[in-house]
Amino acid sequence: MLNPRMMKPAQSYQVGFEVSIRAPRERVWAALVQETTNWWPKDFFSAENPEGFVIEGQLGGRVYEAWHGGGGVLWGTVVVWSPGYRMTWACEMYPDWTGPGRSFVTFDLEDHGMETMIKVSDSGICISASQAATSLGSGWQRLIGMHFKSYVEAAMWSGPNAAHDSGRLSVHFDMAPNGSGRVPPSRPRM
């Protein structure tokens, strides 16, 4: 039997933001790619008891949730890999996750003095584009702009000689659910 929800026409969405992190680009990249499980919050997993979140750091690498007992969910595949500077995932959007659909998530890192600017963009097409834009926009902002930023900066600025401040957060958020509006030049999902 056909699911009427699956018969809706697909629409595009784009979300993006940037955040400044008080750490060198090399440190930000290492935390992003190699330490993902350490900062990825439990409520961002699809399973009750996840083992971790894995980014295989290479072109064609998998981006996935690992579950205890050997299961998991494939989020996407690394389709652009420029170590230290840029990574793009091509992601499937499953029916339970505003799909079916396809999206691209890009992380661009730039040196800004003693800080690193990380730009995140997510562009896709799915049958629930407005819902996806809202969910993914706030999700990426929370994931990278809060959890990731806090993780990296806490590691950089902890210790007896650390200069703590209020953890300023510089975020620009642009949500364009139907392809209208502008998103940072790099493109691409959660």
Image (spheres, rainbow, N blue to C red):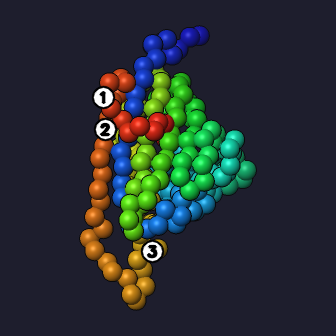
Res 83 label? none
Mark 1 and mark 2: Cα distance apart in space: 8 Å
Q: Which residue type does callout 1 highlight?
A: Gly
**Residue at 43% across, 45% down:** 120
Is 21 displayed left or right of 172 in the figure? right
- Left or right, 60 with reference to 119: right
Helix, strand or loop at label 3? It is: helix
Residue 119: image location, x then y, percent:
41, 48
- Please tell me which residue lies in front, 110 or 132: 110
Task: Name the residue at 68% across, 44% down.
Answer: 59
Q: Is mark 1 in CB contact (under 8 Å) with mark 3?
A: no
The residue tagged 1 is 181
Q: Position of residue 171 (x, y in %)?
A: 30, 51
Quadrant containing the N terminus is top right
In terms of sequence position, does the residue under pointer 1 or pointer 3 come before the other? 3
What is the distance, in whole Å, between disc 2 and disc 3 at their CAs?
Answer: 29 Å
The residue lying at 53 percent from left, 24 percent from top is 100
- Which numbered marker is on residue 174? 2
Report the residue at 56% width, 11% height from top.
Answer: 2
**Pointers 1 and 2 in contact (C-beta within 8 Å):** yes
Q: Camera-side residue: 148 or 47?
A: 148
| Secondary structure of the residue carrying numbered label 2 | strand
